[in-house]
């Protein structure tokens, strides 16, 4: 590990939680250089919905590379880009009656968010944007400004402005519907809120602690924004591409976002790739107004197309996600019933928040020791977040969940015997 400590910046983070050198990835499994297997319940923070190195995608990739097909092309037209656009239109947009222009903003999630914010502000001529408590949208200046977490925001080194924060669903407890609060602020001309260009939303706040917006809350939000002519930007970077069951996370709520941000699992293979989808009337970009060298990653176009062909021609995957999501939820609920805690999530992003804020971090550490990679989320890492590949076989899912359960038992017992405290939490 010396070279990482000696040469790589202190900014590194995940390698501190999972301190080994990984060598192979197959489906739901990671293997380190010593040959030890890990069940991957982290799935590249949602970038590996179809697992590591999916064989069909890999085959296409290998033959594309072997044939000297174009890898890099800025935003020039290529066969791989044409195939992706046609397939995305045929399998995703058209069947859902969705009409959008597709913009390639640069290869990562934060690029998709930056582009969304820029075009929303340009088109409306307004600077203010509404964003939610506990939101996470990325680490560059514009996306950090709409992100909630103080620790992340601190890194900016400059004031992060032109954003008004609103409480997410449930932020004020179950008694207060935060849409009422938003409505009041928008209606009252003395609320002090400058007319917003847009509101940016995650339907499930993944990094923020697996906070789930209910369908009625989402529907009310959609109507309110229409009434006040505020653009709705949905950041589906982590919970899109099937994570909640449907391709987009907002489908069940019937929302019609003006702008949609996609990345992470869009390439299907863990290759960097992002898209910002715009209602056609919002596509008011002048040519070159949002340039970037890596907006034509043809390997990603290729695997993204293959992933759509593999998984989105019927509803098999969606049904599997719903079924496996229920399985994860029921296992987490058993833990919460036993040890206290709250379970929340949708589809195959599920989290459990224990009464002791340190527990999730300790369980994640213990799980790694026992061969499961599982991350935490939330303002104090208080939520254990289960985010496996959507394609994980049921047996492996059960095995991983059983190991997590053992770890919770272990950590609770160790804590109780050390301090006599943790055992009282139930
Ligand atoms: N938006 C959401 C909802 C995310 O979860 C993330 C990353 O976790 C981002 C944006 C930023 O994506 P990236 O890390 O690729 O810049």
Image (cartoon, rainbow, N blue to C red):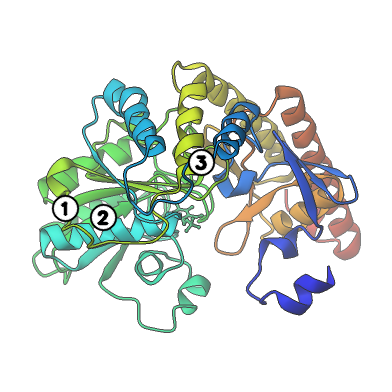
* In this rendering, position of residue 214 left or right of residue 101: right
Task: Name the foreground residue: 90 vs 195.
Answer: 90
List the residue tagged with mark 3: 265
For label 2, the SS is: strand
* Callout 1 crowding tier (Cα within 10 Å): few <14, some 14–19, many ≥20: many
| x and y percentages locating residue 341 in the rendered image | 64, 46
List the residue tagged with mark 1: 230
Of marks 3 and 2, the one in the foreground: 3
Q: CA distance from mark 2 to mark 1?
A: 7 Å
| x and y percentages locating residue 11 in the rendered image | 63, 74
Q: Which mark is residue 199?
A: 2
| x and y percentages locating residue 1 in the rendered image | 83, 67
Whether residue 245 is situated above or below residue 151 in the rendered picture: above
Quadrant of the image occupied by residue 424: bottom right
- The answer to the question of whether label 2 and label 1 lie on touching residues, with beta carbons closer than 8 A, is yes
- Say which label, 2 or 1, has the lower sequence index: 2
| x and y percentages locating residue 366 in the rendered image | 82, 53
* Callout 3 crowding tier (Cα within 10 Å): few <14, some 14–19, many ≥20: many
Q: Residue at x 45, y 74 (%)?
A: 153
């Amino acid at each position: 590990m010396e070279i990482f400590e000696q040469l790589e910046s202190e900014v590194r983070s995940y390698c501190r939680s999972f301190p080994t050198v990984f060598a192979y990835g197959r489906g739901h499994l990671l293997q380190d250089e010593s040959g030890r297997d890990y069940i991957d319940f982290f799935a590249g923070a949602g970038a590996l919905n179809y697992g590591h190195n999916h064989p069909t995608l890999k085959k296409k990739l290998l033959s594309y590379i072997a044939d000297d097909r174009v890898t890099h092309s800025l935003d020039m037209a290529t066969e791989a880009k044409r195939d992706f656009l046609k397939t995305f239109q045929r399998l995703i947009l058209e069947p859902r009656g969705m009409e959008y222009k597709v913009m390639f903003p640069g290869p990562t999630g934060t690029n998709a968010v930056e582009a969304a914010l820029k075009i929303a502000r340009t088109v409306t001529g307004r600077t203010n944007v509404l964003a939610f408590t506990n939101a996470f949208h990325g680490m560059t200046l514009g996306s950090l400004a709409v992100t909630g977490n103080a620790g992340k925001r601190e890194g900016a080194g400059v004031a992060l402005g032109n954003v008004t924060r609103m409480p997410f669903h449930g932020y004020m407890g179950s008694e207060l519907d935060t849409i009422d609060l938003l409505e009041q602020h928008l209606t009252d001309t003395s609320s002090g809120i400058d007319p917003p260009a847009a509101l940016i939303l995650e339907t499930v706040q993944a990094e923020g602690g697996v906070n789930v917006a209910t369908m009625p809350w989402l529907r009310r939000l959609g109507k309110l924004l229409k009434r006040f002519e505020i653009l709705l930007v949905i950041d589906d970077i982590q919970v899109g591409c099937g994570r909640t069951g449907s391709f987009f996370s907002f489908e069940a709520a019937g929302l019609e976002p003006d702008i949609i941000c996609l990345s992470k699992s869009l390439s299907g293979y863990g290759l960097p790739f992002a898209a910002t989808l715009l209602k056609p009337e919002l596509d008011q970009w002048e040519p070159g107004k949002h340039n970037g060298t890596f907006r034509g990653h043809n390997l990603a176009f290729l695997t993204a197309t293959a992933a759509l062909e593999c998984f989105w021609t019927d509803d098999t995957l969606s049904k599997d996600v719903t079924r496996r999501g229920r399985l994860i939820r029921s296992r987490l609920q058993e833990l919460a019933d036993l040890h206290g805690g709250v379970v929340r999530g949708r589809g195959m992003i599920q989290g459990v928040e224990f009464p002791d804020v340190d527990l999730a971090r300790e369980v994640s550490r213990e799980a790694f020791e026992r061969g499961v990679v599982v991350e935490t989320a939330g303002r104090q890492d208080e939520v254990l977040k289960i985010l496996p590949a959507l394609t994980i076989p049921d047996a492996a899912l059960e095995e991983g969940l059983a190991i997590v359960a053992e770890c919770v038992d272990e950590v609770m017992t160790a804590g109780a015997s050390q301090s006599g405290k943790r055992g009282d939490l139930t």
